[in-house]
Amino acid sequence: MPALNAERSDGSSTKDSSPEPPPRTSTPATPIPTCPEVRQPSSTAIGIVMERYQMNEDRAFSFLARASSHGNIKLRHVAQELVDQQNTREPGAFVAAGCARSMH
């Protein structure tokens, strides 16, 4: 295998003459949201899915990740939508519906 800076038989160098890429900056272009802003809706959404579909935490996360992937929507947006929908439901509607079904 030839060396990176080897000389050719005609005396020219084999070193790549392309310019060096600019150094990476450690500061992102847009601010990264703090962890609680992202984690809170996701954790809440996992809890909602766990309760609603009687799943463990890993399966609930996989459920949300699959919904995110199939809809081509970021997971945090899927989670936030689920939390928002849950917050707009009538309090006790899920429990009342479950009780009505079990009485018949």
Image (cartoon, rainbow, N blue to C red):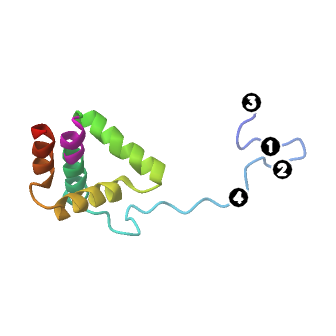
Image location (x, y in percent) of residue 44 = 19, 51
Q: Quadrant of residue 63?
A: top left
User: What amino acid does circle 1 point to?
Assistant: Glu
Residue 76 has which mark?
none
Image location (x, y in percent) of residue 80 = 27, 59
Q: Which residue is outermost to the right?
A: 10
Q: Residue 24 vs residue 89: left or right?
A: right
Badge 2 is on which residue? 12
Q: Quadrant of the C terminus?
A: top left
Task: Check if residue 52 falls in the magenta segment.
Answer: yes
Mark 3–mark 1 distance (CA, rounded to whole Å): 13 Å
Badge 1 is on which residue? 7
Which is closer to the viewer, label 3 or label 2? 3
Q: Crowdedness of circle 4 by 10 Å Cα count: few (<14), some, many (20+)?
A: few
The span shown in magenta is: 48-54
Mark 3–mark 4 distance (CA, rounded to whole Å): 21 Å
Which is closer to the viewer, label 3 or label 1? 3
In this rendering, does residue 35 appear at all? no
Badge 3 is on which residue? 1
Q: Crowdedness of circle 2 by 10 Å Cα count: few (<14), some, many (20+)?
A: few
Question: Which residue is depicted at the point 47% across and 60% down?
Answer: 24
Mark 4–mark 2 distance (CA, rounded to whole Å): 16 Å
Residue 18 has which mark?
4
Q: Earlier in the sequence, mark 3 or mark 2?
A: 3
Task: Check if residue 65 falls in the magenta segment.
Answer: no
Q: Earlier in the sequence, mark 3 or mark 4?
A: 3
Query: Which residue is nearer to you in this view: 7 or 89?
Result: 89
